[in-house]
Amino acid sequence: MRRMKLKPATVLGITVLCVVLGTVAWELIERIGLYFYQAMPSLAVGPYGFDVGVLAVWIRINPGSILALPAAVLLLRRL
């Protein structure tokens, strides 16, 4: 099977998408856990980002962000 040649923008886009989805998924897991168990510590670090006046981008790094990176690598290998 021949592998597709991926552009750097595609690799970066898929990686960022996976990290953002991992962050959101972990946030949901934390909120559901907090709802059911009433005492779940937050494992998030951050927020990290930048603010240029007109544009502000921030992301909280949590275990879901880190766990999403291997998922992005697997997805990129499949393409």
Image (cartoon, helix red, strand yellow):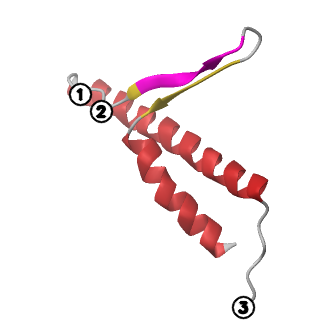
Image height check: is 54 above or below 69? above
Amino acid type at image mark 2:
Gly
> Which residue appears at 37% of the width and 29% of the height?
44
Label 1, label 2: how many angstroms apart (C-alpha)?
7 Å
Could you tell me what secondary structure mostly forms the magenta stretch?
A: strand
Residue 40 on image: x %, y %: 23, 28
Q: Residues within 10 Å of mark 1 (few under 14, many from 20)?
A: few
Residue 18 on image: x %, y %: 58, 49
Image height check: is 50 above or below 13? above
Residue 34 on image: x %, y %: 29, 26
* Label pair 1/2, CB-CB below 8 angstroms: yes
Label 2 vs label 3, nearer the camera: 3
Snapshot quadrant of residue 16: top right
Q: Is residue 50 left or right of residue 43?
A: right
Image height check: is 77 above or below 58? below
Res 40 label: 1
Q: State the SS at label 1.
A: loop
Q: Which comes sooner in the sequence, label 1 or label 2?
A: 2
User: Which residue position is annotated with label 3?
Assistant: 1
Label 1 vs label 3, nearer the camera: 3
> Which residue appears at 50% of the width and 54% of the height?
69
Image quadrant containing the C terminus = bottom right
Amino acid type at image mark 3:
Met
Depth order, front residue of 33/50 = 50
Q: Which comes sooner in the sequence, label 2 or label 3?
A: 3
Task: Check the image and name the residue furthest to the bottom.
Answer: 1
Q: State the SS at label 3.
A: loop
Label 1 vs label 2, nearer the camera: 1
Q: Which residues are magenta?
A: 46-52
Task: Check the image and name the residue furthest to the top.
Answer: 53
User: Which residue position is annotated with label 2?
Assistant: 33
